[in-house]
Amino acid sequence: MKNIEEAFFYVNKTIENGWSRSVLLNMISGNLYQSQGKAITNFSKTLPDYQSDLIKETLKDPYNFDFLQITANFKEKELENALIDNIQNFLIELGSGFAFVGKQVELKVGSQSFFIDLLFYHIKLKRYVVIELKSGNFEPEHPGKLNFYVTAVDKQFRDENDNATVGLITCKTKDDIIAEYSLTDLHKPLGISSYELRKILPENFKSSLPSIEDIENELKNRN
C-alpha cells in the first residue's frame, strides 16, 4: 500500500464487511482502492444526486475475476457458468449487499422472450441490478439492449418499495470515450466496467486432462 489513506480504506472495508485475512489480501491484490467507483456511468443524469455517488461507489472498474478457471477464447456462456460455479467469490468481488436472484432470467415483452445474463438485488440500496457479460470488447450497441432489459425489470419485477433498477455491462476491454458516448442519451441508470482475468488456462487444457474412463482403466491395469 502506497499511503496511509489507502491503509485506512482497507481497514474500514474489513470492519464494514467482516473480511477474513484471505479476502483482505485478495482485495489488496485486486487493487480495490483504485478500482472502486471507477466504472463509466450515466448516474449523474439518471439518478437523484443523493443516490448517484452512493451507487457509483458500489461499482468497480476493473473487476478481478482471477478466482475463475477458464480457458482462452471463452464464450459468454462459459464466463457466466464459471461465475455461477464460483458464486461465493463472485459475490465477494461484487461487494457487500449483493444478493443473487438468477441467471438467464426470462423477460416476456410483447410476443417475445428475452433473457438477462445475471440478475441481482442490492439489499442495502433496495434495487435490482442487471448484469450483462461480454467475452470481448465493448461495443456501442451494448447499452441500448441493457437499457431495454432495465426497463423490463422495472416494469415486471420492481414494486413500490424498490428503487430504480441499475444495469451493468462488464466486458473484457473497453474504450472509455466510446463507453461515455454510448451512455449519453440513454434514460436508465447504466454502468460499464471491464474485468481482469490473469489466470487463463490454455485452450487444450481440458483435452489434456485424463477422462474418467482413462483413470478407471489405469486403476484396473495397476490391479
Image (spheres, helix red, strand yellow):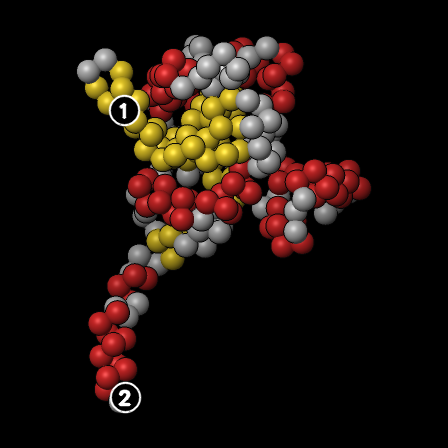
**Picture residue at 62% right of the left edge, 40% below the top:** 32
**Picture residue at 51% right of the left edge, 17% below the top:** 162
Q: Tell me if I can see residue 147 in this picture.
A: no
On the image, the x and y values in percent for residue 59 come to 55, 30
- Residue position for label 2: 222
Q: Residues within 10 Å of mark 2 (few under 14, many from 20)?
A: few
Q: Residue furthest left?
A: 111
On the image, the x and y values in percent for residue 156 come to 37, 16
**Left or right: 32, with 178 as reference point:** right
**Picture residue at 42% right of the left edge, 15% below the top:** 154
On the image, the x and y values in percent for residue 57 come to 61, 27
- Residue position for label 1: 114
The secondary element bearing badge 2 is classed as: helix
Q: Earlier in the sequence, mark 1 or mark 2?
A: 1
Q: Residues within 10 Å of mark 1 (few under 14, many from 20)?
A: some
Q: Quadrant of residue 170?
A: top left
Q: Judge by depth and name the residue closer to the eye, 118 or 146.
A: 118
Q: Judge by depth and name the residue closer to the eye, 75 or 99.
A: 99
Question: Is 106 above or below relative to 13?
Answer: above
What is the spatial separation of the Cα atoms under label 1 and label 2, in whole angstroms? 53 Å
Q: Which three-letter amino acid code belongs to the residue tagged 1?
A: Phe
For the C terminus, the quadrant is bottom left
Question: Is 5 above or below relative to 158?
Answer: below
Q: Which three-letter amino acid code belongs to the residue tagged 2?
A: Arg
**Picture residue at 67% right of the left edge, 44% below the top:** 18
**Left or right: 26, with 216 as reference point:** right
Q: Residue furthest bottom?
A: 223
Q: Quadrant of residue 211?
A: bottom left
Question: Is 184 above or below relative to 132?
Answer: above
The secondary element bearing badge 1 is classed as: strand
